[in-house]
């Protein structure tokens, strides 16, 4: 895991630490500089620790401006004074390692929360897209239930209706037929019924309510026919409609 090598916790009162005061008494301000340089090097390592070996001391000596033996002496002094700890062939700062392990754990929690949040948003986006593209199972069922109820209602209503027209495809109740005869006259009613029957047969079109359709057609025809120009019904037409 890549680490942010630009940060480590530095207490504002570190210069008052008794162990660092003892280190300064032994090595002077140069020792304090060596110490913070050592902390920076440890911080840049993945495990926050360095190998306790001559090769490590040789490398540190270049930047610390002293001999490798002096570096080793300095590290051993820090280990003896519990500023550093040595274990399994490595040495590290227990204070810094504790702080960095806690910071890494916090960062991992935040990263996991970020991944979880991103996944939820992705799932919501997919769900929203899916709803827009095609209906869900529940919405399909609700639509089918609604259609079934409408079909049952139509079938129930049709039981009370009689069949009219040349092609036996115009459905009206006795009350609806009587209203048409009263309002339009028997001749006009018969003419409209035959017209609707022929239209439905030739086009295959269906209407939810034939009575409403006939009324609509009669109003439309009335707007086109001049007043006082309504044809009188013939005797045969009257007999058929009765």
Image (cartoon, rainbow, N blue to C red):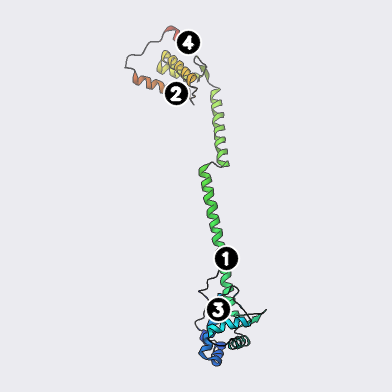
Q: Are marks 2 and 4 in contact (CB under 8 Å)?
A: no
Total residue callouts: 4
Q: Residues within 10 Å of mark 1 (few under 14, many from 20)?
A: few
Above or below for 112 versus 199: below
Q: Residue at x 41, y 23 (%)?
A: 216
Q: Nearer the viewer, mark 2 or mark 3?
A: 3
Residue 76: image x %, image y %?
62, 87
- Residue at 44% in and 14% down: 190
- SS class, disc 4: helix
Dot 3: what SS?
helix
Q: Which mark is residue 109?
A: 1
- Callout 2 secondary element: helix
Residue that label 3 marks: 41
Residue 138 showing in the rendered view: yes
Asked if residue 143 lies left or right of residue 234, the reply is right
Report which quarter residue 148 is drawn in: top right
Q: CA distance from mark 2 to mark 4?
A: 21 Å
Badge 1 element: helix
């Amino acid at each position: 895991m890549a680490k942010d090598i630009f940060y480590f916790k530095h207490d504002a009162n570190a210069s008052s630490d008794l162990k660092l005061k003892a280190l300064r008494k032994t090595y002077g301000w140069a020792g304090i500089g060596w110490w913070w340089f050592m902390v920076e090097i440890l911080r840049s390592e993945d495990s926050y620790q360095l190998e306790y070996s001559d090769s490590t001391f040789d490398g540190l000596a270049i930047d610390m401006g002293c001999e490798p033996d002096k570096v080793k002496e300095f590290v051993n002094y820090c280990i003896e004074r519990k500023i550093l700890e040595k274990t399994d062939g490595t040495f590290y700062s227990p204070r810094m390692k504790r702080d960095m392990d806690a910071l890494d754990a916090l960062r991992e929690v935040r990263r996991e929360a970020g991944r979880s949040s991103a996944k939820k948003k992705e799932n919501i986006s997919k769900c929203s897209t899916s709803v827009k593209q095609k209906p869900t199972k529940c919405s399909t069922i609700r639509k089918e239930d609604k259609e079934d109820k409408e079909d049952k209602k139509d079938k129930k209503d049709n039981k009370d209706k009689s069949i009219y027209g040349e092609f036996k495809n115009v459905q009206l109740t006795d009350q609806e037929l009587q209203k048409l005869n009263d309002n339009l006259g028997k001749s006009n009613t018969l003419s409209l019924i035959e017209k609707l029957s022929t239209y439905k047969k030739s086009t295959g079109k269906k209407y939810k309510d034939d009575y409403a359709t006939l009324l609509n057609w009669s109003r439309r025809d009335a707007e086109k026919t001049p007043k006082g120009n309504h044809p009188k019904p013939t005797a045969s037409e009257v007999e058929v409609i009765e």
